[in-house]
Amino acid sequence: MLKVNNLRAEINGKEILKGINLEVRPGEVHAIMGPNGSGKSTLSMVLAGNPSYDVTGGSVEFYGKDLLAMSPEVRSHEGLFLGFQYPVEIPGVSMVNFMRAAVNAKRKYFGMEPMSASEFLKMMREKRSVVELDNKLASRSVNEGFSGGEKKRNEIFQMAVLEPRLSILDETDSGLDIDALRIVAEGVNKLKSADNATIVITHYQRLLDYIKPDIVHILYKGRIVKTAGPELALELEERGYDWIKEEVERKDAEQRR
Amino acid sequence: MEESIRQYIELYEHHRDALCSHSIPAMNALREQAAGHLRHARLPRLGSENYEITSLSELLGKDYGVNINRLPMDVNPAESFRCGVPRLSTSLFLTINDRFALTPISTNGLPAGVTVCSLNSQGAVPSEIIGRYYGGLASLDNPIAALNTLLAQDGILIHVARGTKVDKTIQLVNILQSAVPLMAVRRVLIVLEENAEVNILACDHTQNNTVDMMNLQVVEIYAGAGSRLEYYEMEESSVRSVRLSALYAEQSADSHVTINGITLYNGVTRNEYYCRFTGKGAELSLCGMGIEDGERRLDTYSHVEHTVGYCHTDELFKYVLDDSSRGAFTGLVRVDEGAVKTEAYQSNRNIVGSGEARMYSKPQLEIYNDDVKCSHGTAIGRLDEMQLFYMRSRGLAEEEAKLLLKQAFLSDVIEKVRLSHLRERLTYLVERRFAGGEDACLSCKGQESCGEVDMNIEY
């Protein structure tokens, strides 16, 4: 479904992604790990279409279409979802109105009538239960006054409502206590199917105890430097990132010679 | 004498008798004094202190007619005024230009102790009240107040007797309609006696886009001890209209006053608020919002004076500016010596949505004693990029996301409206304003509340 080919991107003139290659197929769970500052969040922002980032090279295909040519909203309609590392607070916009606008925008894109109020509320109720999100949060402003855990659960709730084909979860585990982590991970697992895929971006192995990846990538200095099975995550947990860094430096030095 | 003032002084001198013959002695008594002030006045120009975007000299220099002889205007209010507040049953009063008009439903449901009438009413209560209060607050040093005092012939008196609580909202609808350029000189006097309570909604409507119209208004508010007043002003006029309004309020001990000025559609507007506390324990919530686009101008000036201690001011003004519009906010909160335990918070926040729009903001605090809690602040910025991206990443089109963010930005001013039906209505109107076109009624898709009101008028 997703083919990333030699993707390069920069922000404020600084190159962050230096040639990313990645392929994701339906039903797969990918984990992207890497030390701080390696470009993990940039990759998620570029895939979701954040206009603050400039793509300087490469291509991304999403179900055969040119993802990079699409606006962020069209990427969403086409089935891409980004769970934000820092969900944005929007005071004055209620969660309910926000989700109704989102759902109806997608329906409009596919030439469907807006959802009726009762249908919509019923769906909200069902989807809330996926992450045990309190009803009262739904009537509040988007993420405003939410705790860290509530914000992340709210991301998964939105994912449940929008039913994406590919979800990118950026550090969804950061700032979560163990109970919240379990609820969030269970939510993600409930939404998993043979037709959709997930990219989990994480710094630690912890989340991968709950969301089992099929493939683990290591991102370092803007490139994917290692790809392997789930055992790679365990190795990282044990040995840290230093050996990866050393390996990369050594290869680079060899190439220079 | 300044040229732009001369025409009004001459008008007054030539038509003094006609002008006075239509008005009560209390109004006539102040005219000479007002003329005296104006003869020596130097009108503020662009860039004069506290006049960043408004030139009174230029605005008043235009040739507007004044309806000296009180000719009835050919106006069909049902055509001009279309926006009621659904589910909010109000006691409705009209002024057509500056002339007071009664509608059959005006006095429905108003309890004894409430007087709403023309300033020219002959009754015993109005005469006594007007005689005592008219012109008591409006300073003739202010050219807007002086010119209004010079030429005003009619207006509205709202008097609420001691201890009277008015459940039904009093709605004043001001309609500006004329075939020729016109200056409407309107005067409003609101007097709440001790422990009186009332909510007032004043709406300005101009549907005419082709004629220059000036709305020159002075409002004087006396809030007696322990009284409660909520006073909302909403402007829905046209790009050709100019509104110069000066509101003066004086609050006695333990009174609660909310003043909320909402500018949805306008041309050039300057709203001035002068508020003063004379008794301890009083509270003022002074707020407003404006949605400006095209070439529209909105200028707010506020002067809040804490002359006594233990009073509380909460001030919040928010603007959203697009296209080539201009906004200005000048606010001064002054805490006098001896006004201990004062709490005063002033805030002005603005979104400037285009490179051509401009906002001038000058929040000021002057504090002359130690024992106070005060703050002031201003912010001028663009829509938050991250909020926009977050919304778009959920599928909202960029324009829709911007619209929601602008509405959301104004939501805390709307939240300050305590009348829930008015709050809902305002939410709808703001939504429509952002989504819609140039004009209030032309862009109104939901005509649901139009023509609801029985519009037979008696003067």
Image (cartoon, coloured by chain):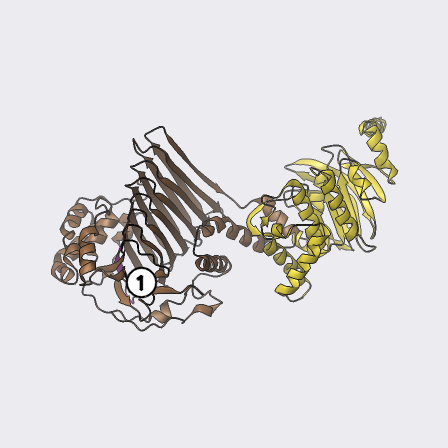
Tell whether position B179 is magenta: yes
Q: Is residue A177 left or right of residue B43?
A: right
Tell whether position B438 is magenta: no
Task: Please state which of residues B90 and A244 is positioned toward the viewer in this rendering.
Answer: B90
Q: Is residue A2 left or right of residue B114?
A: right
Q: Quadrant of residue B81?
A: bottom left
Q: Quadrant of residue B275?
A: top left
For image coordinates 33% across by 68% down, the residue present is B108
Residue B207 in sight? no
Residue A45 coordinates in the image, percent (x, y): 69, 44
**Vertical placement of B196 versus B78: above or below?**
above
**Vertical placement of B45 versus A36: above or below?**
below
**Vertical placement of A237 versus B284: above or below?**
above
Which chain is indicated by disc 1?
B
For image coordinates 61% across by 51% down, the residue present is A136
Residue A43 coordinates in the image, percent (x, y): 73, 42
Q: Secondary structure at mark 1?
A: loop
- The brown chain is B
Magenta span covers which residues?
B174-192
For image coordinates 56% across by 51% down, the residue present is A93
Q: Is residue A254 left or right of residue B48?
A: right
Instruction: Tell me the colour chain A is drawn in.
Output: yellow
Identify the residue position indicated by label 1 in the image. Answer: B111
Q: Quadrant of residue B26?
A: bottom left
Q: Amino acid at mark 1?
A: Pro
Q: Is residue B258 left or right of residue A195?
A: left
Residue B451 coordinates in the image, percent (x, y): 40, 72
Residue A162 coordinates in the image, percent (x, y): 70, 55
